Amino acid sequence: MTALLLTARLALAAPTEDDIPDVVDACQDPETQAWVPLPSPYTRESAEFFVRSYGPHGAASGRYTVWAVHLRDGGRLLGALEVRADDAEGVASLGCWSGPWARGNGYMREALGAVARFALDPSGLGFDQLNWVYVPGNEASRRLAVAAGFRFDEGILTSVSLHGQTREACVGTLRRDDVGR
């Protein structure tokens, strides 16, 4: 089950049926499509799968957790975050997307901080390290990760598949000991 996380302005919980229209709209956004490995075209059926199957399966399997981001007083879906266990023991990857209507308000920075703290908390998901994969060119992603405390100074590179193309990417890290500094 996805834990409810609350921040000063936000409520993060498992995506619901009510989120489906906003998931469709956000994932059809050209900026989101450019940087997130999503089906293209992104259809209502894609969003229904995300909400009804993908998120619940991750929670049930314990391999990944998905949160939908909303203002605490409700309203439109602002975005989503996912923590996915990596092959290395105690390590997970963290990623997110936001709807174009939510950008520029610091919502994702606030949500990312809450999810990172929970993921690294021994009483939360209990990971020792989180990784953030940044594809050069997506400067908003890099700025968001750096604002949350991820470090890209270790020169870790990886390859990612993005819309059928292999791209070089940088990996930033955030360790349990880094949180709260």
Image (cartoon, helix red, strand yellow):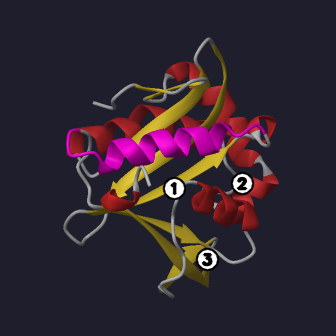
Q: Where in the figure is residue 156, as x and y percent of width and height?
A: 47, 85
- Asked whether the viewer can see residue 39, the reply is no
Disc number for residue 34: none
Q: Where in the figure is residue 97, as x and y percent of width and height?
A: 62, 48
> What kind of residue is marked 3?
Gly
Find the residue positioned furthest to the front.
181
Residue range (magenta): 105-123
Q: CA distance from mark 1 to mark 3?
A: 19 Å
- Asked whether the viewer can see residue 53, the reply is yes
Q: Is residue 39 above or below residue 157?
A: above
Looking at the image, which is closer to me, 104 or 149?
149
Between marks 3 and 2 in the image, the one whose residue lies nearer the viewer? 2
Say which quarter of the image contains residue 165. Answer: bottom right
Name the residue carrying label 1. 95
Q: Judge whether residue 160 is colored magenta.
A: no
Find the residue positioned furthest to the top.
73
Disc number for residue 164: 3
Name the residue carrying label 2. 32
Q: Is residue 143 above or below residue 119?
A: below
Q: CA distance from mark 3 to mark 2?
A: 16 Å
Kindly identify the residue that appears in the image at 53 percent across and 45 percent down. Answer: 112
Q: Where in the figure is residue 123, as x and y percent of width and height?
A: 20, 39
Left of 26 or right of it: where is 3?
A: left
